[in-house]
Amino acid sequence: MNRRDRIAAALNGGLRPSALDVTDESHLHAGHAGARPGGETHYRIHVISEAFSGKSRVERHRMINALLASEFESGLHALAIHAKAEGE
Amino acid sequence: MTNAHDRIDAEVKSSDVVLFMKGTPQFPMCGFSGQVVQILDYIGVPYKGINVLEDGDIRQGIKDYSNWPTIPQLYVKGEFIGGCDIAREMFQSGELQQLLADKGVSVGQKASA
């Protein structure tokens, strides 16, 4: 599994999202700080989940970051997050 | 770690608005840090930019300080507000400007660094 698939699996398992899109944007950052020759450093996620209902932005990001802790420890450098609850 | 924590704690309480970033407000070294610089400059709020690339202890320490794995990190009156996405969403909705007003931080002045 590549990192994109691992991120998707972790978020699917932890958030039961109704919509989830994970995009590898590492190529957009090639040569910049944090980029690595093998890529898999920069990602953007769009996620809609009932789990975010009533949660603040910081709380939502923390939920996502916690699910992806092992990825951050293994070279995930940047994560752009769009996290919405149902109906937002 | 305690040392870095104490230094960070002192920094976030030393200025109303503090941005831990890569590079400087004049020369951001990262697109995400640069976005927050643009937002703060647009609002016209004075802030202190701290370049984590200059200090490895701070670079790691700031991630531990707020249990937040990425940089930039924005603080207002010592409170962690969020990173680039949150700052942008709050700016676009007007919440960031409102937060600054609620906390008594004057805006609309020429930004200093």
Image (cartoon, helix red, strand yellow):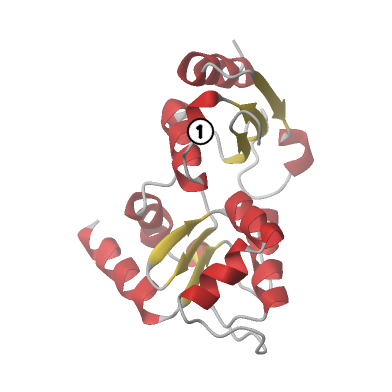
Task: Say if residue B26 shows up in the picture.
Answer: no
Task: Say if residue B106 shows up in the picture.
Answer: yes
In the picture shown, does residue B32 fall above or below A12? below
Q: Quadrant of residue B30?
A: bottom right
Rendered location of residue A12, percent (x, y): 55, 15
Rendered location of residue A67, percent (x, y): 44, 26
Rendered location of residue B71, percent (x, y): 53, 53
In the picture shown, does residue B46 fall above or below B29? below
Q: Residue drawn at (66%, 62%), measured in percent from left and top?
A: B91
| Residue positioned most to the left | B2
Rendered location of residue B68, percent (x, y): 43, 47
Q: Residue drawn at (73%, 34%), measured in percent from left and top?
A: A25
- Left or right: residue A66 compared with residue B1: right
Query: Crowdedness of circle 1 by 10 Å Cα count: few (<14), some, many (20+)?
Result: some
User: Which residue occupies the foreground of this view, A69 or B103?
Assistant: B103
Q: Residue drawn at (25%, 56%), measured in percent from left and top?
A: B1
Q: Quadrant of residue B58?
A: bottom left
| Pointer 1 residue | A53
- Left or right: residue A78 compared with residue B59: right
Question: In terms of secondary structure, where does tag 1 sit?
Answer: loop
